[in-house]
Image (cartoon, rainbow, N blue to C red):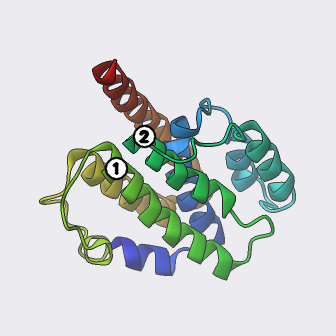
């Protein structure tokens, strides 16, 4: 099943987890640590996922309020702007429609942020890539991000709430990769 189809069929909790996973994988670009979004993940594991969502979201936004450079200069700066957009558009009192739109936008935004970090000069048609699920011709970071997004939604479709731990583990590993890429690029500029 394609990423677009998986997003279209996901329930509220899976949509929130999908969007949150995209944001979580990119949070190093905002200077966030591994635990900054942990309270939101905890919400998704609770019976009433939305009871504390808005409060915990605001706390995460405050912690990540270091901002991004204006105007953005480096590819990392541009990727940080995209990540900030994901954070700024998280629905505080989510409905299924808002979550579906946000998860879909996060999918595209995370792919674009990874593309920035890979210096990809391709002419990627994001809707086509997400519908077909193909990774041929994509830069390594973008291909890996596309595979992760698909795996997250498949895990949640198969395992429901019990799949959240696996989704979080996927995000932790992806953050490590992203930090390594950013660090390597910073050393190259120095």
In the image, residue 67 lies at what x, y percent?
66, 42
Q: Is residue 5 above or below residue 103?
A: below
CA distance for labels 2 and 1: 7 Å
Name which quarter of the figure residue 187 lies in.
top left
Q: Choose between 183 and 171: the one closer to the eye.
A: 183
Q: Are marks 2 and 1 in contact (CB under 8 Å)?
A: yes
Residue 50 appearing in the image: yes
**In terms of secondary structure, where does tag 1 sit?**
helix
Q: Choose between 64 and 20: the one closer to the eye.
A: 64
Q: Choose between 50 and 28: the one closer to the eye.
A: 28
Q: Farthest left residue? A: 137
Residue under pointer 2: 76
**Counting residues from the N terminus, which is met first, the one under dot 2 or under dot 1?**
2
Q: Is residue 25 above or below residue 107?
A: above
**In terms of secondary structure, where does tag 2 sit?**
helix
Q: Choose between 28 and 19: the one closer to the eye.
A: 28
Query: In the image, what residue occupies the spot 46% across and 35% down?
Result: 175
The disc label shown at residue 106, or none: none
Query: In the image, what residue occupies the spot 29% across and 52% down?
Result: 142
Residue 166 appearing in the image: no
In the image, residue 155 lies at what x, y percent?
45, 58
Residue under pointer 1: 116
> From the viewer's perspective, is 76 left or right of 19?
left
In the image, residue 22 lies at what x, y percent?
50, 53
How many numbered tags mark residues here?
2
Is the N terminus in the top left, top right, bottom left or bottom right quadrant?
bottom left
Query: In the image, what residue occupies the spot 28% across and 46% down?
Result: 141
């Amino acid at each position: 099943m394609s990423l677009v189809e998986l997003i279209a069929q996901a329930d509220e909790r899976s949509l929130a987890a999908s969007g949150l996973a995209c944001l979580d994988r990119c949070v190093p670009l905002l200077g966030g640590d591994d635990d900054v979004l942990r309270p939101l993940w905890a919400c998704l594991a609770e019976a009433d996922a939305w009871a504390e969502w808005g409060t915990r979201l605001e706390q995460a936004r405050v912690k990540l309020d270091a901002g991004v450079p204006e105007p953005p200069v480096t590819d990392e700066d541009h990727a940080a702007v995209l990540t900030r957009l994901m954070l700024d558009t998280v629905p505080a009192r989510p409905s299924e429609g808002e979550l579906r739109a946000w998860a879909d936008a996060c999918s595209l935004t995370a792919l674009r942020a990874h593309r920035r970090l890979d210096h990809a000069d391709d002419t990627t048609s994001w809707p086509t890539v997400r519908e077909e699920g193909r990774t041929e011709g994509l830069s390594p970071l973008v291909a890996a991000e596309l595979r992760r997004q698909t795996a997250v939604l498949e895990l949640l479709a198969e395992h429901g709430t019990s799949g959240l731990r696996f989704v979080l583990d996927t995000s932790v590993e992806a953050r490590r990769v992203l930090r390594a890429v950013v660090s390597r690029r910073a050393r190259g500029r120095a």
